[in-house]
Amino acid sequence: MRRVLIVGGGQSGLQLALCLLEHDYDVTLMTVHNASELYAGRAVSAQILYDKSRGSEREYGLNFWDEVAPPLTAFRASSYGSDGTRFFDWIGRTEAPAHSIDERVKMSVWLEILEERGGKVVLHGATGSDLDHLTRMFDLTIVAAGHSGLADMFSVDTSRELARMPPVATAIAYVEESPDHPDQEIGININPELGHLATWPAYSVNGRCSLMLLTGRASGPMSRFPQRISPQEHLELMLQLMAEYFPHRHREYRGARLADDRAVALDHTHPLVRHPIAHLPSGGSVLGMGDTVVVTSVAMLQEANNAAMAAKVYLDAILEHGDRPFDGDFMQSTFDRYMEYAQYFTGAVAARLHLTTPDVTEFCMAADTHPSLADRFGRDYGDPPKFAEWFAEEADLRAMIAEAVENTSTAGT
Ligand SMILES: Cc1cc2nc3c(=O)[nH]c(=O)nc-3n(C[C@H](O)[C@H](O)[C@H](O)COP(=O)(O)OP(=O)(O)OC[C@H]3O[C@@H](n4cnc5c(N)ncnc54)[C@H](O)[C@@H]3O)c2cc1C
């Protein structure tokens, strides 16, 4: 039986661990918190998983929340001036629902199940020297420990486009559902001064709720978040920023109440791609996965999908590799295979969305009056390679806009 060590109990690490167990691998997972600590702790992140990324969870019976999580069936993209001038405000329907489950709920259940199904869980924050020793005891060691700490073992790939994007700060709050903010969609609001506000229905430790997310340049208005702040103060600061930069949404959320008293998180990231292999002093190598090696801007709402797809691609590669050694060639080719999926939101598509190039602005304005464009966005956004087919290049996007305009005028004659 092949022995695999996975360091990190987030979306990518736990998903891969649970799937490998089903194929009779001997799996050890090292992580920091046990299930009860995760569940009772402070919120760690937000995640939206689109239908395609939820495929593995369905295939391996890990989709325990399908009946209770609110279905996210559309994107609503809007931009208003501070005086209320509407630039655009459109809804694009998804082909199949996305879900957003608080990691405190999902990871605590997955961790328990991993142990019940025979996986070994070691509660210990691994260090580089631990790994130097441990890799000798396993056929393959994968580091999926998030974007800080152990991630520094993997050198940054400065040749990637995204590495030149500025650091980003993100604040989230899970708030109680309310008739005042009856979000049905994944609401994305853009204000170039701050960045993005996103809101959507989610499922957290106290059941259904709404999620508020503000993300933007760490040196911009988001720098107002101090290091130490109570959850209530964190919510109040988010509402204050919404009042200043997204007044049309603030009206709906001004009475928002935290869904539980630990329902907030603040995060700083630097979008980048790292080299996937870290070499250890005694000769071993470890393979990075998920946020450890690929961090996109949170505003793209793709990161958790990347983590889930990484787990799927790595699983397929491990299974196909059979009994051969998990050497450097295996590690590099597995990562390259993953980047065939992840390249768009680490490269051209991310850069165009982030910089809101003139053709992207034109698309957003055109989608306001041409629902076929809005729906095309909604349908393809959760499938990056498909989305990139028409969004990655200016010429393709302009052709798509022209076609929609032409179809509308033909229909009107
Ligand atoms: C505030 C915030 C908002 C976000 N919003 C969105 C969003 O809207 N949409 C989206 O798609 N994504 C979002 N993300 C990102 C998304 O949550 C991550 O991309 C995703 O969770 C990455 O999964 P992962 O498995 O790579 O790492 P993580 O989920 O970060 O898991 C890492 C795990 O490793 C453990 N660990 C850390 N260090 C060690 C160590 N030394 N030894 C052992 N274990 C260790 C941690 O405890 C954790 O369990 C957000 C993240 C944050 C922080």
Image (cartoon, rainbow, N blue to C red):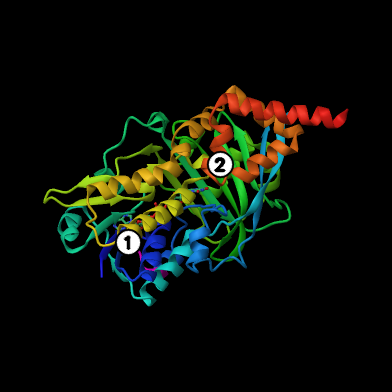
Residue depicted at x 61% and y 40%? 242
Q: In the figure, is residue 225 to the left or right of 150?
A: right
At which x and y percent is residue 16?
38, 61
Residue at the far left: name it: 282
Question: Which residue lies at the image location 76% right of the left edge and 32% below the top edge?
Answer: 369
Are the two marked residues, 2 and 1, in contact with CB atoms closer than 8 angstroms?
no
Q: Is residue 40 visible?
A: no
The magenta segment: 31-36
Let me know if residue 392 is in the magenta part. Answer: no
| Image quadrant in which the C terminus is located | top right
Q: Which residue is mark 1?
A: 32
Residue reaching furthest right? Answer: 413
Q: Secondary structure at mark 1?
A: loop
Label 1 Cα crowd, 10 Å radius (few <14 / some 14-19 / many 20+): some
Inspect the image, locate mark 1, and give the three-letter code of the amino acid beneath it: Val
Pointer 1 residue Cβ closer than 8 Å to ligand 1: yes
Camera-near label (2 vs 1) is: 2
Q: Is residue 34 magenta?
A: yes
Q: Is residue 360 left or right of residue 131?
A: right
Whether residue 111 is situated above or below residue 266 in the rendered picture: below
Counting from the top left corner in percent of width and height, residue 69 is at 61, 62
Measured Cα–Cα span from mark 2 to mark 1: 37 Å
Q: Which residue is mark 2?
A: 386
Residue 272 sits in quarter: top left
Q: Residues within 10 Å of mark 2 (few under 14, many from 20)?
A: some
* First-in-chain label (2 vs 1): 1
Instruction: Give the number of the disc on residue 338.
Output: none
Mark 2 belongs to which amino acid? Lys
> Can you say whether 281 is above or below 119 in the image?
above
In screen coordinates, is 248 left or right of 145?
A: right
Q: In front here: 304 or 394? A: 394
Front in this rendered view, residue 138 or 225: 138
